Amino acid sequence: MEVYEPFKEAIEEINKAGGERTKLCFQCGKCDSVCPWNRVRNFSIRRIVREANFGLSEIEKDYVWLCTTCGKCPSICPRDVRQIEDIVAVRRVANNYNIFSDTARPIKMVSSGLKSEGNPFGEDRKKRTAWTEGLSVKIFNEHTEYLLFTDCYLCYDPRMKKVAKTIANILNISGVDYGILGETENCCGESIRKTGNEELFKKLAKENIKNFIDRGAKKVITTSPHCLYTFKNEYPEFKVNFEVIHIVEIIYKLVKEGVLRFNKKFNKKVVFHDPCYLGRHMGIFEEPREVLKAIAGITLLEMEEERENALCCGMGGGRVWMETHKEERFSKIRVMQALEIGAEVLVTACPYCITNFEDTRVVLGLEDKIEIKDITEIIAEAL
């Protein structure tokens, strides 16, 4: 039997990076019992926490980079170990030494794009507003009520640009006074922070905050739950607070007040997938369902794993930038769950989820079996 001595220097480094709570873990195993990775392969979040506590983390190994930060394990942990913070702490140490597993190496390219152009794709910053062509979308100024923070995916990804246009049309029809930052908008930095690159996150956040303040922004609408999370929970670390809401929340408000009315039917069986960062992390479960219920013709279904127990799509925690083997994608399980209950449309409210489900649908050859839609796309069809 091998006996290991605690590696004190490594323990200090992990604790300094934010992993102090690893010592609270008493290895009950509840975290492993709910981790979605164990649906597709053997994985132990408990092991990572234990190794970090003794300074024995093998930061070059793939398992350090698997956690999607879905939030399931912290929600049931009896000791408040805060596994996400522990995982990110270990990744920060890996970043400090520039050590990445093979599947995590794309993060380096993503970081380069974020540094040079403010987006993970490395696309020209000047093209950030190309999606607005032909639309009535103004640049935000101090007299505008809402700042629409459009998110990198909605600005550059061909599929998600359609969602950006849809959102703008809905806000225009509703008479909402909004504007965008345009070329000066940066990535919110949430995902890159979860990969352990704290320095780059702070750079992006500080630039965004300065931009918000200089423009006079007080109310922010986000299109991504990840932006929502970081603006509400992480940007206050820089001593600022903005009123931040997700697009689903403002649409729910507009429907409830009678400003937004549905004139057409949507005669399909629909199931809503709760994105981890909209649902479990931010507690927004009922608003999207209530909006869908307000549309005539919809048969709203529910999957067995819904709301707080919803299955992660697999793209959080920076996994959106990493390689995931085809047979290990949670999204495959989720799409099949939707089909099993007879859903014709799998609808959600997160660019990562949509991108992942669209890809999975193609890989599984299910293009003619089920549609993948952002909730705003159904709303637009019913106006």
Image (tube, helix red, strand yellow):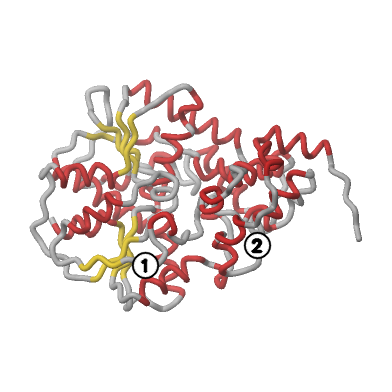
Tell me if I can see residue 318 in this picture: no
Residue 12: percent from left, percent from top: 77, 34
Identify the residue under disc 2: 43
Q: Name the residue rendered at 74%, 44% in the picture.
A: 53
Count of numbered tags? 2
Q: Name the residue rendered at 19%, 55% in the picture.
A: 380
Q: What number is the disc on residue 340?
A: none
What is the residue that sits farthest to the left in this orientation?
Answer: 263
Quadrant occupied by the C terminus: bottom left
Who is closer to the viewer here, 233 or 204? 233
Q: Name the residue rendered at 49%, 24% in the picture.
A: 238
Residue 39: percent from left, percent from top: 56, 68
Tell me if I can see residue 120 in this picture: yes
Quadrant occupied by the N terminus: bottom right
Residue 31, image quadrant? bottom right
Who is closer to the viewer here, 314 or 175? 314
Residue 212, image quadrant? top left
- Measured Cα–Cα span from mark 2 to mark 1: 25 Å
Identify the residue under disc 1: 303
| Mark 2 or mark 1: whose residue is earlier in sequence | 2
Mark 2 and mark 1 residues within 8 Å of each other at the beta carbon = no
Q: Is residue 310 above or below residue 193?
A: below
Mark 2: amino acid: Phe
Residue 183: percent from left, percent from top: 38, 36
Residue 337: percent from left, percent from top: 40, 72
Q: Residues within 10 Å of mark 1 (few under 14, many from 20)?
A: some
- Judging from the image, what secondary structure is the residue with disc 2 in? loop
- Judging from the image, what secondary structure is the residue with disc 1 in? loop
Q: Is residue 279 above or below residue 141?
A: below
Mark 1: amino acid: Met
